[in-house]
Image: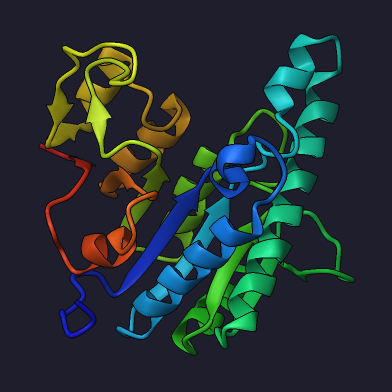
Amino acid sequence: MSSATPKYRRILLKLSGEALAGNQGYGIDPLVISTIAAEIKGVVALGVEISVVIGGGNIFRGVAGATKGMDRASADYMGMLATVMNSLAMQDALEKIGVTTRVLSAIDMQAVAEPYIRRRAMRHLEKGRVVIFGAGTGNPYFTTDTAASLRAMEINAEVILKATKVDGIYSADPHKDKNAVKYQSLTYIEVLQRGLQVMDATATSLCMDNNLPIIVFDLTCPGNIERVVTGEAIGTIVKGV
């Protein structure tokens, strides 16, 4: 598989925080994060420039905190800090296997991460380093999906790879509805009109306005990141008409 030619030169990989928790449901599963790191290393070896955005749901969910009486902005800032924790864990896992990695944070915390500066992020990518964007957009009321869309646009990524626990986008939850139909491809408008849970509406609209494709695929199947990058038709692609 590693002899394949990559279809994309620069990508943004969006991971949910829950993905790092594995079957334990919260926190960070060392086996899961090291497995993802090994897959990223394989894609770096193909000469692909990789940036990563990780959610914080395995540690703290801002919206959930807000619904329990916490101020929404405070809850979202806590969620942003959780994403930085996940980013540092992923950096550690990648550097343990020899992949040079930089964490750039939208919230200034220079003791643990570099500040997010667009041109600096581009230079790191050009030098073959994996760049992890932490702390979302740095603003409350925006999800890490929106952060992923925004950063992908800023660094001129060619595609967003949205890693999930299912093998694409379905008409309904395939775990609950046996009649759920998998889509091979969708337009941004179809995703928005049907209310499909791909990314939130802000993130999807941002991708639509800038014609940035989103590929939703199953992270739990080994080798899938490389398969998507080399152009195999797995998962579901969301794009313009």
Residue 101 on image: x %, y % = 61, 78
Tell me if residue 240 can be seen: yes
Residue 84 versus residue 182 in the image, above or below? below
Tell me the quadrant of the picture where the N terminus can be found: bottom left
Q: What's the residue at 83%, 60% (across, down)?
A: 108
Q: Nearer the viewer, residue 64 or 94?
A: 94
Residue 183 versus residue 17 in the image, above or below? above
Residue 54 on image: x %, y % = 58, 51
Tell me if residue 158 can be seen: no
Tell me the quadrant of the picture where the C terminus can be found: top left
Left or right of 54, for residue 211: left
**Quadrant of residue 59 within the rendered picture:** top right
Q: What's the residue at 76%, 55% (across, down)?
A: 85
Residue 44 on image: x %, y % = 40, 80
Q: In the orientation shown, which residue stands out farthest toward the right?
A: 111
Left or right of 237, for residue 53: right
Q: What's the residue at 80%, 37% (across, down)?
A: 77
Residue 22 on image: x %, y % = 56, 44
Residue 21 versus residue 178 in the image, above or below? below
Question: How many marks are shown on the rendered structure?
Answer: 0
Q: Nearer the viewer, residue 185 or 32?
A: 32
Left or right of 7, for residue 173: right
Q: What's the residue at 81%, 27% (across, down)?
A: 75
